[in-house]
Amino acid sequence: MRARRREINIFNMSLLDILCGALGAFCFMMLVALPYYIPPGKSRDLRKSQEETQKLMHDLEQMKTQMRDQKSVEEMEALMRRLEAQVKALQGQLNILTAEKEELQKRAEQLVAEKAQLAQEKEALRAENEQLKDANKKLQALLQAKKPFTIIAKADDSSQGLDTVLFKSEIVEKGPAPIFKNWLSGDYDNLHTVRNAFLYGSGLGFFISSDSPPGSEAKIFVRLTNRPGSRRATKIEGVIAGDEMWNAPVRLPKVTLDPERFWIMLGTMSLDQNSRPHFQEATAAERDAAWQTLTETTPPPTPTPTPPPTEKERAAEAAQRAESAAKRVKLLAARQKFMKLMQLQVDDTGRNEAEFLQLADEILKDLPPRDFMRREVESRRDHVLQMKARREGGTPSPNNRVTPPPRAPGPMPSPTS
């Protein structure tokens, strides 16, 4: 009979029991020895205190041997035990305070490093601030150097509107550009549009520049802003005025514009380093070359001035302008009444009916026959009359029309259109 093999298990329950017991004993020893643990790096005061404690314990032992009374000896032993317990407690507190001290030292060193880093960042910000101050000073000096100036043109015929403008020399040299075409059509920018509407027919034109840098160069142009049918030969003169120049402005040459040559290049304006403008009049050849380059057409002949209008013609023109102004005032008043009419609410009860009909009659009396507001007012008035006839039980409105209900008004043109 063959014997069975036995398996040898090293890690059995008995070994685990021994290991657990050893671990428990180790933990118990650590808990008992914890009050006596003194971390490394303790100060000299701690060693000195321990030496004094040992000396005191030695003195107590000597006193114990010298004492003959057994009761006193027992009291002394009890006192020594309390003293030893108190010493152990103090040592534990000392260990805790020593650890906190080391932690505070590390924190202090960290704060010192952060302070040094903040100081470096402060110096960097201070240097950046100085750079910004220098850049600001340069910018202020540049803005002060850009002194604004005005180009003013005047026509001998106040019925002719004028427009002046500055174009860079590159535009004239390269040929036709959208900005020049827009200027000729009156759509250069919003400022020109508002200015032309304000000065139309006053014989004045001006151009204000506040951003031309020192040392720049540009061409000065002037044109008639009237419609082609109302343009006529007109003498133009002008000046360049600005800061420190009002008492001695730069005079512009006298030119003549007519329906065919309704715009012209006066010359070249340059700004020196002090932003003071200087002007060089263009020759006839340079003006013809500018016309050829910008319009790609042959320039028309130089216009000759026509004699000034007579007193009778001036009086007729003044009367015509006064009549036009009166018509514009009347049209503006009619449009204000129209806006008030559109806000009135009229219903079958007759509310606001009398006021509505009175405003409608006043508006129709002042409006021209083909004005768009006239059709709107007539339509609304007929509708109100139909409601009034139905309410009173009488005959319908005289025109026997059925009109739609009031609708919202469309956009209104300006009084000068």
Image: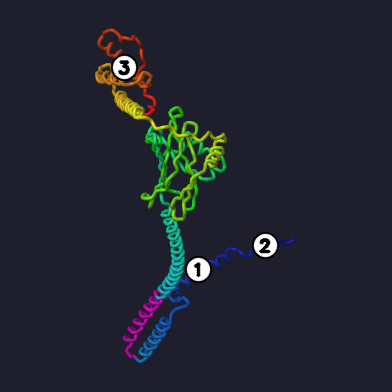
Does the magenta run of residues contain 2?
A: no
Please name the amino acid that badge 2 sits on.
Glu
Cα distance in 3D space between marks 2 and 3: 121 Å
Q: Is residue 101 above or below residue 216?
A: below
What residue do we see at 44% from left, 48% from top? 211
- Bounds of the magenta segment: 67-93
The answer to which of 149 and 241 lies nearer the viewer is 241
Q: Which residue is mark 3?
A: 381
Badge 2: few (under 14), some or many (20 or more) residues near its Cα, within 10 Å?
A: few
Secondary structure of the residue carrying tag 1 is helix
Distance of label 1 from label 2 (alpha carbons): 30 Å
Q: For mark 1, what is the residue?
A: 24
- Residue 117, position as x, y percentages in the image: 46, 66
Q: Position of residue 220 (x, y in %)?
A: 47, 43
- Tell me the tag on residue 7: 2
Of all residues, the one furthest to the top in this rendering is: 395
Q: Which of pointers 2 and 3 lies earlier in the amino acid sequence?
A: 2
